Amino acid sequence: MKFGRLDQPEHIDYALPADHPDTERVLRRNNAAKPLNVYVGCAKWNKQDLKNFYPRGTKDELAYYSRQFNSIELNATFYNMPKREQVITWREKTPEWFRFFPKITQIISHLRRLNDVQLLVDEYCDSVINFEEKLGMVFLQLNDNFGYKNYDRLAHFIGNFPKAIPLAVELRNTEWFNNATVSAEVYRLFEKHRITNILVDTAGRRDLLHMRLTTPSVFIRYVGANDPIKDRERLDGWIERLSLWVGQGLRDINFFVHQNIEMESPLLATYFIGKLNNEFGLALKVPNLVDNGVQSHPVTQNGLRFDY
């Protein structure tokens, strides 16, 4: 992911900001007896981006990927409207525990900018509903020049989006978060319609870490800086924050790892899965990277050596 990329990310303070005061209120409303559901994955499964992830001779990349990770942030649906037949093919290639988190197509979000898109939304939803039980959540990502002047479009889109399909929204324009009146209005809209407010952790846009949850689910898009030590320290910080939120009532964690050089995404995601298992007593599958030919990079931190 190039969004938020900086030439010198090592100078950034990556500490997570304090929670928005209303985040705990939202989480406390949740059913604390509900099991903890955790999905961690990458943004793509193709061999070109995840170089060295696949064993030599792998013929079906999705079939292999879906037996290493339990989910995918599906960016392929952003570039082209998904077809029903393609969705069914993807669904049938993956195990029963796998979940897809498809991005809404760019003609809706970026080209039409939510204007006069109901027929396109219907077409998109008619396709992705064929993921059936393997549909995790769809997400709408809006251009960073899509500001508050377009609020009515956003409200209309959300109000008419099918309630049967869970929806998350990523707003990028600074006005949504840096103007208290504007942010309060959009957060009320999201809470009313049970829309998950996406958090983006990237070097060049720390304002997107507004730490405001609007549902008892969290959708985090994490962008590493291809720095073996700093990226792991950042993930450790997320473990601490997620532990706090789980104690307050969070029961659904959706975490997707990007990198400026995507080939390293499986390494970071694997590290994070191991930390989640340790913290929450989970049994998420840890991807088998050793036998995949993935190049590991020895790093020493606090006197301890680990492979990255």
Image: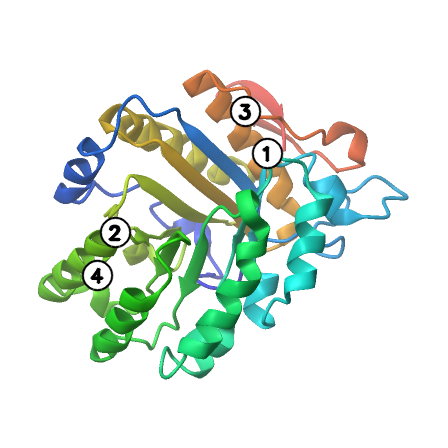
Q: Which residue is mark 4?
A: 177
* Contact, mark 4 vs mark 2 (Cβ under 8 Å): yes
**What count of labels does the image hold?**
4
What is the CA distance from the residue labelled 3 to the residue labelled 2? 26 Å
- Residue 24 seen in the figure: yes
Q: Residue at x 56, y 44 (%)?
A: 134
Foreground mark, 2 or 1, reads 1
Q: Earlier in the sequence, mark 4 or mark 3?
A: 4
Dot 4 lies on which element?
helix
Question: What is the secondary structure assignment of the residue under circle 2?
Answer: loop
Q: Which mark is residue 274?
A: 3
Picture residue at 46% right of the left edge, 57% below the top: 8
Indicate the colouring scheme.
Answer: rainbow
Relative to 292, residue 104 above or below: below
Question: Dot 4 surroundings within 10 Å: few (below 14), some, or many (20 or more)?
Answer: many
- Disc assigned to residue 210: 2
Mark 1–mark 4 distance (CA, rounded to whole Å): 35 Å
Q: Position of residue 138 (x, y in %)?
A: 46, 56
Question: Tag 3: residue type?
Answer: Gly
- In the picture, the quarter occupied by the N terminus is bottom right
- Which of pointers 4 and 2 lies earlier in the amino acid sequence? 4
Which tag is nearer the camera, tag 1 or tag 4? 1
Q: Nearer the viewer, mark 1 or mark 3?
A: 1
Amino acid on which disc 2 is placed: His
- Sequence-wise, the earlier of marks 1 and 3 is 1
Please name whichever residue, 172 or 203, is drawn nearer the observer in this view of the structure.
172
Quarter of the image that includes the C terminus? top right
> Residue shown at 86%/48% (left/top)?
59
Q: Amino acid at mark 1?
A: Trp
The secondary element bearing badge 3 is classed as helix
Q: Would you say the residues marked 3 and 2 are in contact, meaning their CB atoms lie under 8 Å apart?
A: no
